[in-house]
Image (cartoon, rainbow, N blue to C red):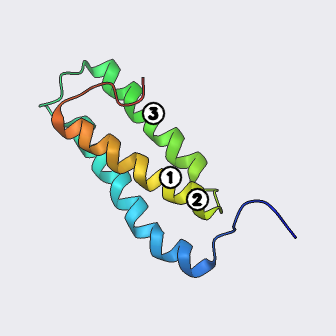
Amino acid sequence: MAKGIIQATAEYLARSRGQVLSLYCQILRTINSPKLPLAFAARLAKKAEVRAIFMLASEEASLHNIDDLIDTAEYSLSLLRKGSTGLLE
């Protein structure tokens, strides 16, 4: 019996792609918001961290890891909207 990661099908990847891209854009927009008390350099650093996370996750083919990425992105977005800057610290 094989143990390991459950691989995502092409259909699942296509379904989740729109949601992941939407969350990515929303997080970047929220980081750019003037309501968030960040200096210019801090904004650039946060955006670079978000890009790196999503770039590495874009190569992911595990159902669990894709679901974890979506859950984490939604949680981070909710923190950013509340004004918390501790997104990735």
Instruction: Indicate which disc residue 41 carries.
Output: none
Q: Residue 41 location in percent, x, y?
A: 34, 19
Name the kind of residue labelled 1 in the image: Asp
Q: Which mark is residue 68?
A: 1
Farthest-out residue, right: 1
Disc 2 marks a residue whose amino acid type is: His
Residue at the spot 23% in from the left edge and 28% down from the top edge:
84
In the image, farthest residue toward the front = 1
Say above or below: 21 vs 33: below
Crowding near the residue tagged with mark 1, few <14, some 14–19, many ≥20 C-alpha atoms within 10 Å: few
* Alpha carbon distance from label 1 to label 2: 6 Å
Q: Quadrant of residue 76?
A: top left
Name the residue beneath numbered marker 2: 64
Q: Earlier in the sequence, mark 1 or mark 3?
A: 3
Cα distance between the residues tagged 1 and 3 = 20 Å
Disc 2 versus disc 3: nearer the observer: 2
Whether tag 1 and tag 2 are in contact, CB under 8 A, the answer is yes
For marks 2 and 3, give the CA distance: 24 Å
* Residue linked to disc 3: 48
